[in-house]
Image (spheres, grey):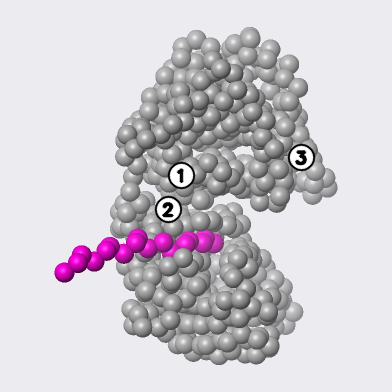
Amino acid sequence: MTTTTDTAHDPWIRSESGFETFDQTRLFYRCWQPRDTYRTAASPPLRVLIFLHRGHEHSGRIEPLVEQFAGLRDWAFAWDARGHGHSPGERGAAPDFESLVQDFHWFIRHLRQVHGFAPEDMVVIANSVGAVIAATWIHDHAPHIRGVVMAAAAFQIKLYVPLAKPALRLALGFKPDLAVTSYIRPSMLTHSHEQARAYAADPLIARRISARVLLGLADTAKRIVADAFAIDVPVLMLVAEKDYVVHAAPQQLFFERLGSRHKRLLVLKDCFHAVFYEQGPPMDEAIQATRQFIDGCFGHPIAAVEEHLDGDRNSRSAAQFGHLQRGTLGTALERAANTVQRQMLQWLGPLSNGMQIGLTQGFDSGASLDYVYRNEAGGRFGIGKFIDQGYLQAIGWRGIRLRKQHLQQALSELIATHPANLPLRILDVAAGGGRYVLETAKRFQDRPMHITLRDYAQANLDAARQLAEALALNHTVEYECRDAFSPDSYPIDESQFDIVIVSGLYELFAENAPVLASLQGIQRQLRPGGHLVYTGQPWHPQLLMIAQTLNNHRGEPWLMRPRPQAELDALVASIDCRKTQSLIGLAGIFTVSVARHEPPPAKPVAAG
């Protein structure tokens, strides 16, 4: 239910409503709808401002910002984050920091569904913890938004207590719901006595924050700062010179690493943490810079997605991969440690069943991934099983198993929405052992389904056939030995598919040309209105270690170029597939996305 307030002299119609997020929790938000919403073809571009409040706060405090930054025809929205304001949950708490990012993603999804807004209509204005939520969302989901204002971004909070984070991690093992109370007094947030009093008197401001969320914020912020070059939307960063809450250096490092062509960093002299609630010159400067930035975002054409297609040659990601190839990435100490680890792998690896598969068939091979999916440690002489357990719990392999869950979730949702009385045709272009497809199909034995599994290795197809027989599937399953990168693998005269899956393949190749060739083949075999399910690897925390210790299926060092999500989505968009959702894996290493095939309408043939 929506509550609306409509005052005749108010330029906005204010309303309060809610939306259901990924776990069916209903969160609260506010809307400022411009009174003049009549639009014509000659109207200026639609402008939508999305506000993210600071930690401890709520959307009720956004009202003055809307009046400062929104024009009379601008829409504005602000939410109460989970555990804040009128939204449910323990005050200052959430399952983890990633849940807050997912909540925001679902908030944007809700606004798009209800109002028909496109990402190209939006500018995000975020403060403190809200700025990290926004940066993570932009990095992981790669929305094609106009820009983002980041004020006093909480990439590193000043905890003051020595060894605070290790102590909190230890304490969480004994008390999972541990929360800490903010040490910050209102007078440390702003020079304005009026704003400090309002903050102190606000009953909806949460004084506590979950230790789990606090540590998750720190870990995620470190990842986003390290990989900031993957963010290429316009960014305005407002850094408070006298900030008692967050450090300035990580904000400046993030700015330096940003891949954005249009970016500006403004250090506000004598400014405390609550940038938009200050007074005097710092407040005036912040407001003026933000207004100019918002106008600039909407006043210039948005960057075309095609700009990402040469990311394998002209990008920070490509430069990093070049250093990896030349052996100049990382420090001498890191390279020396990896040399020792490589030697230990050669000596002890054969004792571990998983490592033995990797050493002989490649750590990126279908056989290796199928072993990781099974997640059953095994080895020789007792110690081999112990080594194997550690191997299977590596962060990358844990991420791979979560990717499998996300693949099956996305595939299940697509199958469930397909008309039950119509046959469903599914193609996996590089199936490996086919485990995630076949296990998902087992749960839909009542649906008419035709599954085609392709792979370049006959041994993988033989393993898939054995699994299908063990599962006793009712469906028709075909096995085709084909190269996913060869145009000949996608004959135009074959029946088209409703769902095409490409998983764990494009991540293995740094160049975009073979990926485009594969996608163009998929385009021929995916029916209009059908869906492409594709995986990505935007980054990896063990890139150097993997390159210098593990071998791939070709027997070469396993060198990876993490492909930013925006670049991968652009490649998919080049075949007329529009992304509809992304599922983000452990530490943002892997993603699973779904895109709908929407080819342009055929041009009418002129009468002869």
Q: What residue sits right under mark 2 in the picture?
A: 566
Q: Secondary structure at mark 2?
A: helix
Magenta part mainly helix, strand or loop? loop
Residue 546 % position (x, y): 50, 65
Q: Nearer the viewer, mark 3 or mark 1?
A: 1
Range drawn in magenta: 592-608
Sequence-earlier tag: 3 or 2: 3
* Residue at mark 1 to residue at mark 2: CA–CA distance: 16 Å
* Vertical comparison of 426 with 533: above or below: below
Few, some or many C-alpha atoms within 10 Å of disc 3 (few <14, some 14-19, many ≥20)? some
Q: Residue at x 55, y 82 (%)?
A: 450
Badge 1, how many Cα within 10 Å: few under 14, some, many 20+?
some
Left or right: residue 173 versus residue 46 is: right
Q: Position of residue 511 (x, y in %)?
A: 35, 65
Q: Which residue is located at x 72 percent, y 20 percent?
A: 202
Q: Nearer the viewer, residue 49 or 130?
A: 49
Query: What kind of element bears circle 3?
Result: loop
Residue at the far right: name it: 174
Question: Label 3: which residue?
Answer: 89
Say above or below: 542 vs 522: above
Q: Amino acid at mark 2?
A: Ala
Query: Which of labels 1 and 2 is toward the front?
Result: 1
Quadrant, the N terminus: top right
Residue at 35%, 67% (x, y): give it: 516
Q: Quadrant of the C terminus?
A: bottom left
Q: Amino acid at mark 3?
A: Gly
Amino acid type for the residue under numbered disc 1: Ala
SS at mark 1? loop
Judge whether 196 appears above or below 388 on screen.
above
N-terminal-most mark, 1 or 2? 1
